[in-house]
Image (tube, rainbow, N blue to C red):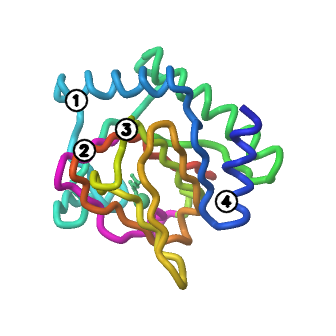
Amino acid sequence: MQNIFNTLIDSFIDNKVGITENFLSVALSARLKENLQELYQDKQLQSAGTGNETLVSHDKSVRSDMIYWLDRKHNNVHENSFFDLMDSFVSYLNSTCYTGITGYEFHYTRYEEGSFYKKHLDQFKNNDSRQYSMIIYLNAGWQAIDGGELCIHHADHLQNISPDNGKSVFFKSSELVHEVLVTNKPRLSITGWLKIN
Ligand SMILES: O=C(O)CCC(=O)C(=O)O
Ligand SMILES: [Fe+2]
């Protein structure tokens, strides 16, 4: 795994956006996707809000995805495999980059056909605990015509990233404005934040 972690961290240091293919093995990404599909069929996903806990609005003109918060307390073997992987990534990141991450939060995300998330920053205005944003995609066989790219707004250019199966993207939550372009197919992912405090 260290090679994959290094690819993510090195590309983050070089380009402000870390990207690695195969952050998830094919097997783990298939299990997570199946778990997410089951939760969706059981109507366990909820409309995502914007803003922090005290100020959540469900503004569908800003974002129209549906989410499910992962939690070790669910005792779900797939969620726990994902958390085991994140624990090893966070300890590697902390030991190599002195990032001081003390926690994280992750949710499953589903964007229906026609959904998007308009330009935003991930760090809340009144709470800086979210330090790094991390997204891991669960979409086998994604094609350019499917849309749904993550579009990062750099100072002098736009960077479009296709949500390919097993790929992970990593960037500073306070720095990079980004958006999810309209998807033409259901688009699945795990989205989260590495936190301090
Ligand atoms: O799914 C993505 O590519 C990005 C999602 C995002 O920006 C967010 O949930 O804050
Ligand atoms: Fe975001």
What numbered label is drawn on residue 123? none
What numbered label is drawn on residue 40? 1
| Nearest to the observer: residue 25 or residue 109 | 25
Q: Amino acid at mark 4?
A: Phe
Query: Quick one: quadrant of the N terminus?
Result: top right
Q: Nearer the viewer, mark 3 or mark 1?
A: 3
**Percent x, y of residue 83:** 56, 29
Q: CA distance from mark 3 to mark 2?
A: 22 Å
Q: Nearer the viewer, mark 1 or mark 4?
A: 4
- Per the image, label 1 sits on a secondary structure element best described as helix
Which residue carries the number 3 mark? 141
What numbered label is drawn on residue 66? 2
Name the residue at 75% across, 38% down. 3
Q: Nearer the viewer, mark 3 or mark 2?
A: 3
Badge 2 crowding class, 10 Å Cα cut-off, few under 14, some 14 to 19, many 20 or more, is many
**Percent x, y of residue 127:** 50, 63
Q: From which residue to which does the magenta span run?
A: 108-127
Which residue carries the number 4 mark? 12
Badges 2 and 1: C-beta atoms under 8 Å apart? yes
The reply to whether the magenta stretch includes residue 100 is no
